[in-house]
Image: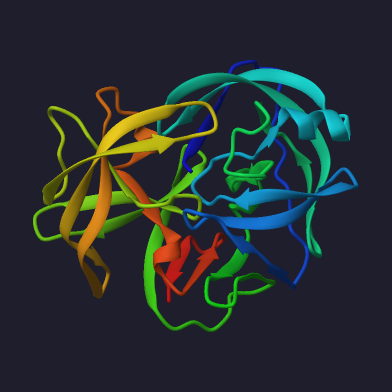
Amino acid sequence: MRECLLVSVAIVVLGTPRLWASSTTPFQLGRQGGVIVPVMLNGHGPFKMLLDTGASHSAIGEDVAAAIGARAVARSVVITSTGESLRTIVAIDRLSVGLVTAEHVLPSVVPSGSFDRDVQGLIGQDVLAWERYTLDFRRRHVEWHDAMPEHHGTALRLSFEHGRFLVSLPQERHTLRLVPDSGAGPVVLYESAERVPFDMLETGRAAELSSADARRSGRHVRLRELRLGGRTIRNLTAVAIRRDHHHPADGDGLLPLHLFDRVTFDGPARLLILG
């Protein structure tokens, strides 16, 4: 799930939360491959939340905000893959995942039941951007690292733009800039009348992309190939979404991380390793 936060009032200053631990946190795999972890908020919980590497900021449901007594501090425009919405921003003093803790988090609030099944919120890059961790989809746990671990796989450079990471993937005739997204189901590609930056085959089937606020129609397509550094995935199913008003934070689409066995983020080194 890709979300980008645009704070609309000057009085809000986003603090930088820190994670101080070396630990392992088990997760559930959502219906579309999302990483669902137990989270404590201001000492309450645990709440089931998505660990969402495609979101610029964290978000919680209205029922969670009420349960923890979170105070409203601002209103903000949030950009998602389905459009824009205005949300309330609340203050959370302490967010804990296992032994990992972040302080002074400012999530937005969405209607209760906005996420899949009983998911109650998401953790975004406002918490994750400067941390080192591995999503192990085989063992279904998150490994939190104090230092960059030894790794085997495809290493890709990350850029940090508008509160989110993007990875540049040179293809045969162009370069795709995708958001590495642990909250996405299929590969998602954005297109417009002037901009079709990928080689794909039509399948003729309609598709629907949803966020916490809205749904947007698209169509299923098949990519002939997707090059990821030294590796290539062929005949990959994707969803194409029309975006006539393209925001720089969008890139060219979303790269779902559940396609891989292990994915490591090294936030300080701006590095992504696909295992």
Image quadrant where residue 99 sits: bottom right
Image-based side of 109 in relation to 257, left or right:
right
Name the residue nearer the viewer: 98 or 7. 98
Image-based side of 101 in relation to 158, left or right:
right
The x and y percentages for residue 33 are 49, 58
The x and y percentages for residue 11 are 71, 18
Name the residue nearer the viewer: 222 or 233. 222
Q: Tell which residue pokes out farthest to the right in this image.
A: 43
How many circles with numbers are drawn on the protein? 0
- Residue at 59% of width from left, 17% of height from top? 8
- Residue at 27% of width from left, 51% of height from top? 238
The image quadrant where one finds the C terminus is: bottom left
**255 up-or-down from 24: above or below:** above
**119 up-or-down from 37: above or below:** above
Q: How is the image coloured?
A: rainbow
- Residue at 15% of width from left, 48% of height from top? 198
The x and y percentages for residue 180 are 42, 55
Image quadrant where residue 92 sits: top right
Name the residue nearer the viewer: 253 or 234. 234
- Residue at 73% of width from left, 27% of height from top? 62
The x and y percentages for residue 262 are 49, 73
Image-based side of 224 in relation to 179, left or right:
left
